[in-house]
Each structure stands twice: as structure tokens, then as C-alpha cells.
Image: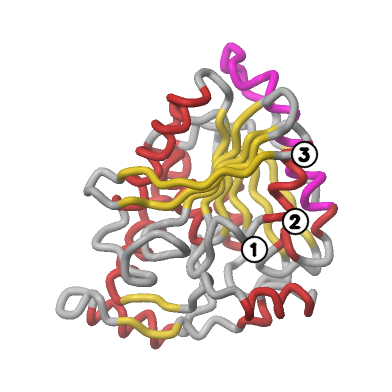
Amino acid sequence: MMQHHEGTFLSADGWHLYYQNWVPADLVRGVIVIIHGLGGHSGGFSRIVENLVHRGYLVYGLDLRGHGRSPGQRGYINRWSEYREDLSRFLMEIQYRECQLPCFLLGHSLGALVVLDYSLRSPSQISGAIAIAPALRQVGVSPIKMLVGQILSQICPRFSLNTGIDEASASRDLAVLQTYARDPLRHNKGTARLATEFLVTTAWVWKHGLDLQVPLLVMHGEADRVTSASASYEFFRQISFSDKKWCAYTDGYHHLHDDFDYLEVLADLGNWLDQHLESHQSSGREKPSVSCS
């Protein structure tokens, strides 16, 4: 039986950000840190958590500022580096508690962009990165709303709009969609400043993708209408570091962990992590690129 804990940690600028963790009953093999997407929160990954805890992983989840139980205007940041600095502080807390356990980042959608940005800038802090449905180019927000965000970012950065993302694009499972609709911690807000910071960050990640030097797993549903599977694959292909893996799911929607193929997704995720537990402290020799599609 796993244990569950909740708490807060102090960000660099003095915010008390919410986190929770799930601890295996037996020996802990490694640490997974989950970063949710826009409008989500750390409690939205129960299937992933249960599967990984069963495999012996200690799982941490962070509510980004402006999300879930963390403070801040919904969907607002002053600058993208706030996400990066928050994650850095969070990892410092985890590493202090968990000593030398290998630590992997797992991000979904906007959270996957946070993970890729962090992995490019601070590769020595992690043992590997997992990007599920990363927001690398196309997002399910109308181009008009993105343009409005760009215009208003400098004069009214906190201007907020409903993102307009189709809620049915999350999963093909109606029961899941109903659960999402009843979740009071989920929101559908985006702000002008977030729009511009997102665009600047995606451009930077694309420009520096060749520099990635950490083991990487990218997972994307080919029927995703929120983020682009083709953009994910294009980004994946440009990475020169050979320890990388691409997993595509033909009919998969945006929330792969809550879609009909979730058992396959969980198996691919767990197997990749297990394969990297023994090799994360190796001499640095790269492994060949592989694909599950």
C-alpha cells in the first residue's frame, strides 16, 4: 500500500507552491517528477502514479503557479523562467530528501515544454526526460486568441481569456471527460503574457534541440487535436543524442494516460524507465535511437 503526502515548498520569489508525493511500500528504485499541462494539476495522473509506484518509483507532482492548489492568477506568469526556477527549487528539495536516487522528469503538454526547456538548460540535474504530447508548435488555442495575447502582453499582461480548447479532445473515454468536467481544480484560462512567453520558449527549444544531452522519451497520440504529433516527431528527429525513443499511438488523444490505449502507454513508459535505471550512471556511452510506433 503506497503512502501519500502533501505539502508546500518556497519558490525563489517567496511563493508557497503545492506538491504531493506517492511513496512505494517497499524499496524505492527511483524518483519521477510530474509536471502537468495548462489548466491541469498534479492530481490528474492517477493511472501513471499507481503504475509507477507499483514498479517501485517514488512519484512527486507539482502544481505550477497559477494552477491547482498553488497560488497565483490562473494561467499567468511574468516570465517563463519562473516555471524553470520553481522546478529547480523543487528538485533541490527532492534531491535533499532522496539523496542519490536517479530522478526523471515527466511532463505533459505545456508541462512537457517545461521539461524540455529545463533538460536543455540543466541536464546534469536529471537522469532522463519524458515528454508526453509536448506543446512544441501547434496548440488547440485559436490563432486569433494567440495574436490578441501577443498584442496585449506588453500593455495588459494579465488579460485573461478562455483558451477555447475543445474539452472532448482530451480523451475518447467519456467517463474520463466527465471526471475532468467535475474537477474543481482544473481551469481553462490563459493570459496574454503566457501566450508570448510560450512562443518565445518554443522558439528557443527548437533552436537548441540539437544540444539535448539527456535520455529522452517522447510519446504522442497521432489523433491529438491539441498539440501536434508531427511537430513532436520533427523535433525528436533533429536530436543528435542517440539515447532517445519515440512512441506514437495511432488513435491516441491528448491525454494518453487517460485514453483508451493507456495500458500500452503505461507499459512503454514503465519499460523505458526500468531500462534506464541501471544505465543512468554509466560512462555516458549513448544508446541507439528506437521507436515503438
Between discs 2 and 3, the one toward the N terminus: 3
Element at label 1: helix
From this view, report whether residue 198 is shown above or below residue 238.
below
Query: Which amino acid does the dot numbered 2 rest on?
Result: Ala
Which quadrant would residue 251 be assigned to in this image?
bottom right
**Which of the labelled discs sits on residue 30, or is there none?**
none
The image quadrant where one finds the N terminus is top right
Q: Are marks 1 and 2 in contact (CB under 8 Å)?
A: yes
Instruction: Give left or right: position of 133 versus 259.
Output: left
Furthest residue to the left?
155
Residue 100: image location, x then y, percent: 53, 18
- Residue 269 part of the magenta-drawn span: yes
* Disc 2 crowd, CA 10 A, few/some/many (<14, 14-19, 20+): many
How many angstroms separate mark 2 from mark 3 (CA)? 32 Å
Which quadrant would residue 166 be assigned to in this image?
bottom right
Q: What stretch is highlighted in magenta?
A: 264-287
Q: Using the image as rendered, state which of residue 60 and residue 249 is in the foreground.
A: 60
How many angstroms separate mark 1 from mark 3 (CA)? 36 Å
Residue 289: image location, x then y, percent: 69, 35
- Residue 228 part of the magenta-drawn span: no
How many angstroms separate mark 1 from mark 2 (CA)? 8 Å
Determine the residue positioned at 59% across, 50% down.
Answer: 131
Q: Mark 3 points at which residue?
A: 1
Determine the residue positioned at 48% across, 50% down.
Answer: 62
Between discs 1 and 3, the one toward the N terminus: 3
Q: Mark 2 points at which residue?
A: 248
Which quadrant would residue 43 be assigned to in this image?
bottom right
Residue 121: image location, x then y, percent: 37, 38
